[in-house]
Image (cartoon, rainbow, N blue to C red):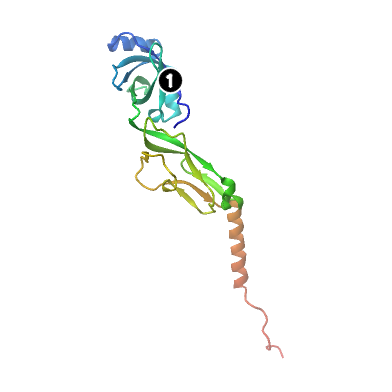
């Protein structure tokens, strides 16, 4: 199961229609709605600055949230749409969808690497390069993994870790339909430079002709 789901606070919006929405914006709020989940739609207001910060942080529409509205039970939601001003590109309305345990959603799940000390490539000075610190998966709302774990035991320099090498939770699958790279173990730059220099010296030595001309001088 996932770790702690972040809270997101909103307040009930009194009144509906364009007039109530304009009033909310003048008060520094963004009007919105919570829908779905076999319950009536709930008009809400969200603090403009809080929403703008969340949007700028990225991946807001693929982050599971614990919606807290005073006078209502907490509910798990995910953002389904953000309407923006056509000129200023600032949020003017937001839609959240309530989630059932069986609802399928797309979420970015962090990747954790373990047992680095058991990787021969790390002992040799290899560098772990993480291509995707998070992987977007299709998961059910009731079975969201906290993280994906990569066991580095036995990995050597030059090895690549693909998504197919990671055990995914039951029912989860990547949104990308190919075997993409998650990380790789490469040689350190110093080692690469040393190898190149050594190779160059060996080639030069092999190309030097022998100067002894036995028997020519009498």
Secondary structure found at label 1:
strand
* Residue marked by disc 1: 8
Q: Whole-percent x and y of residue 105?
A: 35, 32
- Residue located 47% across and 27% down the image: 4
The total number of labels drawn is 1
Left or right, residue 119 beside residue 12: right
Q: Whole-percent x and y of residue 8?
A: 43, 20
User: Based on the displayed image, in which of its 4 quarters is residue 24 positioned?
Assistant: top left
Q: Quadrant of the C terminus?
A: bottom right
Q: Whole-percent x and y of residue 199?
A: 59, 63
Left or right, residue 141 beside residue 18: right
| Disc 1 crowd, CA 10 A, few/some/many (<14, 14-19, 20+) | some
187 and 152: which is toward the camera: 152
Residue 33's place in the image compared with 146, above or below, is above
Q: State the residue lying farthest toward the bottom.
A: 218
- Residue located 62% across and 76% down the image: 209
């Amino acid at each position: 199961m996932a770790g702690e789901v972040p809270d997101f606070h909103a307040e009930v919006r009194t009144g509906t229609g364009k007039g109530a929405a304009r009033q909310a914006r003048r008060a520094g709020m963004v009007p919105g709605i919570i829908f779905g989940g076999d319950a009536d739609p709930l008009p809400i207001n969200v603090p403009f600055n809080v929403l703008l910060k969340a949007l700028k942080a990225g991946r807001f529409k693929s982050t599971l949230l614990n919606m807290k509205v005073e006078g209502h039970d907490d509910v798990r939601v995910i953002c389904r749409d953000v309407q923006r001003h056509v000129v200023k590109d600032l949020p003017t309305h937001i839609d959240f969808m309530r989630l059932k345990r069986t609802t399928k959603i797309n979420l970015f799940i962090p990747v954790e690497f373990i047992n680095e000390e058991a990787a021969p490539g790390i002992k040799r000075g290899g560098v772990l390069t993480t291509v995707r610190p998070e992987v977007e998966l299709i998961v059910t709302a009731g079975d969201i993994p906290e993280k994906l774990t990569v066991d580095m035991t036995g990995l050597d320099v030059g090895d690549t870790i693909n998504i197919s090498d990671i055990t995914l939770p039951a029912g989860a699958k990547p949104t990308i339909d190919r075997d993409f790279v998650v990380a790789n173990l490469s040689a350190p730059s110093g080692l690469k430079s040393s190898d190149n220099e050594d190779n160059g010296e060996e080639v030069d030595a092999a190309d030097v002709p022998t100067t002894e001309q036995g028997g020519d001088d009498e």
